[in-house]
Image: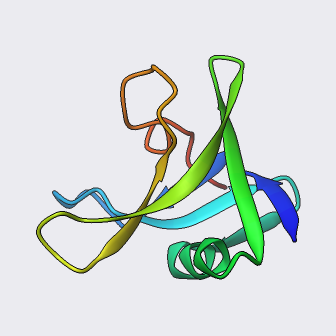
């Protein structure tokens, strides 16, 4: 298992759901579906830094659908930590 820092995101567009398509970090960039699968299988862990505090990225299930999404563990800062990251180049 490897731990990967998330430092950027790529959104799927300006649509209302604000879904993230890709996450990236130093030396890596992958689809949201692959990251979800890596976390769920225990193959890899992902984290990001918010105001100098490291927080784990976790998989959650949307309350009104079966769709999984990524969030960060509760860190005391207003959500959404992932959406506040810069766009990957």
Rendered residue at 63%/71% (across/down): 39
* Quadrant including the N terminus: bottom right
Rendered residue at 56%/48% (across/down): 87
- The x and y percentages for residue 24 are 69, 59
User: Which is more toward the observer, 82 or 14?
Assistant: 82
Judged left or right of residue 72, residue 15 is left
User: Which is more toward the observer, 50 or 10?
Assistant: 50
**Rendering colour mode:** rainbow
* Quadrant including the C terminus: bottom right
Residue 37 vs 25, above or below: the answer is below
- The x and y percentages for residue 70 are 46, 59
Residue 82 seen in the current view: yes
Residue 87 vs 14, above or below: the answer is above
- The x and y percentages for residue 76 are 46, 20
User: Which is more toward the observer, 75 or 19?
Assistant: 75
Judged left or right of residue 15, residue 2 is right
Residue 6 seen in the current view: no
- The x and y percentages for residue 63 are 17, 63
Residue 30 vs 46, above or below: the answer is below
Residue 25 falls in which quadrant of the image?
A: bottom right
Give the number of marks. Answer: 0
Rendered residue at 77%/70% (across/down): 44
Judged left or right of residue 78, residue 35 is right
User: Which is more toward the observer, 77 or 21?
Assistant: 77
Rendered residue at 64%/46% (across/down): 56
């Amino acid at each position: 298992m490897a731990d990967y820092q998330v430092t950027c995101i790529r959104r799927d567009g300006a649509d209302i759901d604000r879904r993230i398509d890709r996450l990236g970090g130093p030396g890596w960039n992958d689809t949201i579906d692959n990251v979800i699968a890596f976390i769920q299988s225990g193959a890899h862990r992902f984290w990001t830094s918010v105001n100098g505090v490291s927080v784990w990225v976790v998989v959650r299930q949307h309350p009104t659908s079966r769709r999984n999404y990524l969030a960060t563990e509760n860190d005391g800062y207003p959500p959404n930590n992932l959406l506040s990251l810069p766009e990957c180049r």
